[in-house]
Image (spheres, rainbow, N blue to C red):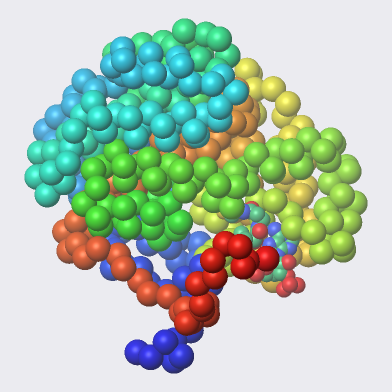
Amino acid sequence: MEEKEMEVVPGLAGIPAAESGISFVDGLKGILEYRGINISDLAEHSTFLESSYLLVFGKLPNKEEFESFSHDIKFHTRLKLKVLRLMEDLPENGHPMDYLQAVVSAMGMYYPARDTLDETVRYESVVRLIAKMPTIVAASHRLRHGDAPIAPNNDISFAANFYYMLFEKEPDPLIEKIIDVLLILHADHTMNASTFSARVVGSTLADPYTVVSSAVGTLSGPLHGGANEKVIEMLRDIGTADKARPYIEGKIDRKEKIMGIGHRVYKTKDPRAVLLQKYAHSLFDHSEAKNTEILAIAEEVEKVCQERLAPKGLYPNVDFYSGIVFQAIGIPPELFTPIFAVGRVSGWLAHWEEQLKTNRIYRPTQIYTGTHEVAYLPMDKRE
Ligand SMILES: CC(C)(COP(=O)(O)OP(=O)(O)OC[C@H]1O[C@@H](n2cnc3c(N)ncnc32)[C@H](O)[C@@H]1OP(=O)(O)O)[C@@H](O)C(=O)NCCC(=O)NCCS
C-alpha cells in the first residue's frame, strides 16, 4: 500500500495484533474467560497454579499432570545465592518493579534458554519464571526495608508461601484464598501493552527471561498497572462515606476522572471487580481486617458513579476493588503492581508459547513525516 493511503491508528486501538485462543472478553456482557472457562468458575474452584497450567498449555491438567507441574514449580521457588547477592546491591529506594525487571533479566544469564524452539527449554523456563517471581517480589520487599529475605516454604501452598516470604508468617485460609484469587484474576487479559510487548520480544526468538523482563518493564508504566494505588489515595482523601457524594459529584462536575472507573473494553462492571467486591466483604467480616470504612466509602462512590457515569458506559474496573483488598491484607501500595506481574507472568508465557507456534517477527510499518534531501552543513555553518 502507498504510504499516503495509510492511516496511523494511535495506540493500534482496535487493530488485531495476533490470533489468540488464550483469553476472551465480552465487554458488553462483562465476561472474561481463560481458554473458554469463566473467570468466576476459576476463582471459585481453581488455583493459580492450575489456572497457569490452563493458560500456558491450553487445557486443565489431569491429576498426574497437575502433580508433576506443582512439584516442578515448588522445586524451583528458591533464588540462587548469587541472585540474592545481586539484589542486595540494588538501591533500597528502587521500586520493586525495577527490582523485578532487573532480576528477571539477570536470571537469563544463570539459566541460559536461548533455544526457544526446544520444548524442554520452554517448559523449564515457564516453570522457573512462575516459581521465582513471588520469591523475587518478596525478597525485594524485605531488602528494601533492611530485612533478610525469607527462603520459600514449599510445604504450604503457592499463595500461602508468597505471603509467608513477605511477612514471615503464614496467612489464615481466607487470606490465602484471596491471594490465590488475586493472582488468578490478574493472570491474563487479552491483548494489552505488556502482553503485546511479550509477543513482540518473543517473536525475535529472544530468550524467555528477556521476554518477561520486557513485559514487566511495560507493566511498570502508570498507564498500565497502578490505578489501584490511586483508588486507595482517593478513598483516603474522601475520609468517610458521608463525604463521598459531594466529593465525587464535584469531580464529575469539574470533568475530572474517577480512578478505578471506566474501561476500554468493559462497558459494564468488570467481572473481576464483581468478584473482588465479594472477597472484600468476606475480608471485612473477618476479625483481623482493619479500616472497614474504606469499603463503605468505595460502595458509596460506586453508587454515585452508577447514577452519574453508568449512562456513559462507565463502571468499576478491576482496580476499583483490588487496592482495597490488597491493603486489607497488609500489602503496601508499591507491591500492588509487582503482585499483578506475579499473576500476569502466566499470561505472558502463554502468549509467548502461542506466538512461537506460528511465529513471524513483528515488523509493522510507519508513515514517514520527516524531510528529504537536506544538505549536510559543516559544524561551523550551523546555528
Ligand atoms: C480506563 C480509561 C482510560 C478508558 O478510557 P476510554 O474508554 O478510552 O474512555 P475515554 O477516556 O475516551 O472517556 C470517554 C468519556 O468518559 C469520561 N470518563 C472516562 N473515564 C472516566 C472516569 N473514570 N471518570 C469520569 N469520567 C470518565 C471521559 O471524560 C469522556 O467523557 P466525554 O465523552 O464527556 O469527553 C478511562 O476510563 C480512565 O482513565 N479511567 C480511570 C483510570 C483507571 O481506572 N484505569 C484503570 C483501567 S483498568
Observer-nearest residue: 44 or 258?
Answer: 258
For residue 3, what is the image quadrant?
bottom left
Relative vertical location of residue 91 with respect to residue 306 in this rendering, above or below: above
Q: Tell me the quadrant of ligand 1.
A: bottom right
Observer-nearest residue: 63 or 167?
Answer: 167
Can the viewer see residue 376? yes
Q: Is residue 349 left or right of residue 134?
A: left
Relative vertical location of residue 63 with respect to residue 192 in this rendering, above or below: above
Q: Is residue 233 left or right of residue 369?
A: right
For residue 100, what is the image quadrant?
top left
Q: Is residue 210 left or right of residue 338?
A: left
Relative vertical location of residue 175 with respect to residue 57 in this rendering, above or below: above
Instruction: Name the residue at 54% across, 21% down.
Output: 91
Quarter holding the C terminus is bottom right
Instruction: Name the residue at 43% across, 51% down.
Output: 194
For residue 240, what is the image quadrant?
top right
Q: Is residue 216 left or right of residue 232?
A: left
Residue 207 image offset from top left, x and y in percent: 23, 43
Observer-nearest residue: 280 or 345?
Answer: 345
Furthest residue in direction front, as rendered: 380
Instruction: Name the residue at 34% across, 19% down.
Output: 83
Can the viewer see residue 176? no
